[in-house]
Amino acid sequence: MTDQKKELMNGADVIVGHLKNVGMPYIFGVCGHGNVGFLDSVHKASDDIKFISVHHEQTAGFMADAYYKVRHEPVATLTSCGPGSTNLVISLAAAMADSSAFLAITANVPTGQFNRNPFQETGHHFQGDFPSVIKPYVKRSYQPTRVDMVPLAVKQACQQLTAGRPGPVNLDVPLNVFVEEDEVSAPLADARINSRSSGNPALLSEALSLLLNAGRPVIVAGQGVLLGEATDALKELAELLQIPVVTSPNGKGAISERHPLCFGTIGRNGTYSANEATKAADVVLSIGFSFDDRATSSWIDGYTFSIPKTKLIQIDIDPTELGRNYPPHLGILGDAGASLDVMIAKARAQISSAPQSTRGWLQKLEKDRDLWRRYQGSFAKSNQVPLRPERLMDGLARSLPDNAILASDVGVHHNWVVQLWDTIRPRQLLQSWGFAAMGYATSGILGAKLAAPDRPCVCVAGDGSFLMTPHVLATAREYNIPVVWVVWNNYAYGSIRDLQHGLFGGRELGTSFETVPDGDLYNPDFCALAASFGVDSIKVTEADQVEDAILHAIAANRPFLVEVPVDRDIRPVGSGTWALPPLPHHEPNFLAQARALGLL
């Protein structure tokens, strides 16, 4: 940097110039007195960077999170001092939990007012201390307190976003640093840094040998396969070795769920065939999967996994994940794609044709998959109103084109999406998995559409999650972002109501949406709400209207809401479980239900 020509620049221009250099096309945010100087610099650069003004900072973060999940290219958010930036905390936490990257530019009070308790300073223990507020939820915070510190801070912040395991990074800038000038050298955009190395070749050879000699091998693909853009390599290895593949819920799309070697999603709301595969396997190859509680049936032996009886080969780019929840037989630190490429090369050198040793194993799992599909299909054509959840999911499957992006918000409807939605492309399903932040998809679908303007983008949101951030309707209308919201109306925070019914004798409090004191079920008129924002809508009143309503909403090519009444008392069938100690966990009921239908 010392050899570069210096220019008289203010801090905001330095930051905006670097965002242009690294190719960030959007900033999502909300204005405030602390960031007006930065907004002025963005205005000057509006030919290169578009600012999207939202109506709550949480929405800005969710949009940036979804944008990254679709394109694997980070964008930025902008928030102001005090409540402006603290409103961003939930979306930072959601992104951190799901390894999603965005640059959170937060404004702070002027440095000359540090320690004087000015308007909106976080300073009880340390001056200008907003970075401590978000410390658990970002990879790193940078706080340049002089203009000459800005070039290095913004450069390092942008590099940190996607180095190793992706995640959000904070650039916290005092108001005066945005507007003061100094002689500085603008940071250069570095060539893309490759921090994704393969695992130890000797260990990868040993892993391949274990798989080739196994009788019941299974590959578990986690979100790391998506983040490492390793989906093609995963498919190639599975086909070379003729090994069944299952995914974590957050890894859906790592392989097409219509591929003959894919047996679905594991865990609490996983498919029967997937949970049967992993719990009976003799060798499991896990790639980029963190073995969280909902995906593993809360680590209870014999429900989703039987480790260490099953030998675990664990590949992950994050060393803290290796052995965190299960003891690996082989723990391999490495990027998913690079490691799979090494294993593919070794497999090609060792085998001349597809192995036949797994044929019987695959046939057994194919029968399990067929039983699962026949069971679910028995409900998918129901015409009852309110609709069965399976009927709505079938309608979505029939009406969404193969290139559509589906974003699921958080709630009981999310369990149905995980269980029944066939994800056929990488990065096709967006969800807040680790932090499970309500409002994520309702807001994030706007970021998804900006990331993929040529693809239909549809959000499935429960009534509870939609009402967390309904103001996104205004943003979509203001910027003409043509997305579709399908509101799953069951008059409840349904997933928690289900827990009350399952664990506390059906005693409900705070979970049903109803008027007091009469107890009548209540929700706003979602179509009238949409109309008040200038957004078109349709309310489904018959089951056979679902497909046409969604097709019409997509074809309209403008913001559109579809309200669907859904039966609140039908719950997903269980092939796994989930425990909240010391409360008892439920037992899987799939086989009993299938037997009751005469399918066994």
Image (cartoon, rainbow, N blue to C red):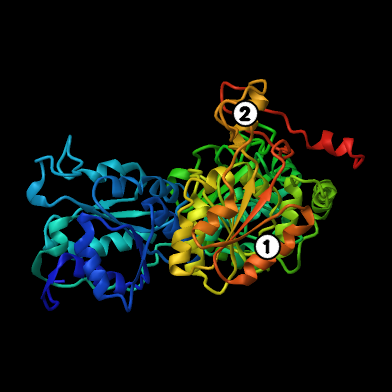
Specify whether residue 199 is in view: no
Task: Please tell me whether mark 2 sits on a helix, a strand or a loop.
Answer: loop
- Residue 209 in percent (x, y) is at 65, 54
Q: Residue at x 10, y 41 (%)?
A: 115
Give, as a three-letter code, the residue at label 2.
Gly
User: Label 2: which residue?
Assistant: 519
Residue 15: quadrant of the picture? bottom left
Give, as a three-letter code, the residue at label 1.
Ile
Q: Is residue 485 above or below residue 453?
A: above
User: Label 1: which residue?
Assistant: 550
Side of 198 relative to 149 (left or right)? right
Residue 354: quadrant of the picture? bottom right
Q: Residue at x 54, y 68 (%)?
A: 482
Q: Is residue 245 above or below residue 321?
A: below
Front residue of 490 and 334: 490
Q: Residue at x 12, y 52 (%)?
A: 110
- The N terminus: image quadrant: bottom left
- Residue 523 in percent (x, y) is at 59, 42
Crowding near the residue tagged with mark 2, few <14, some 14–19, many ≥20 C-alpha atoms within 10 Å:
few
Front residue of 247 and 333: 247
- Residue 541 in percent (x, y) is at 73, 52
Q: Is residue 576 above or below residue 470?
A: above
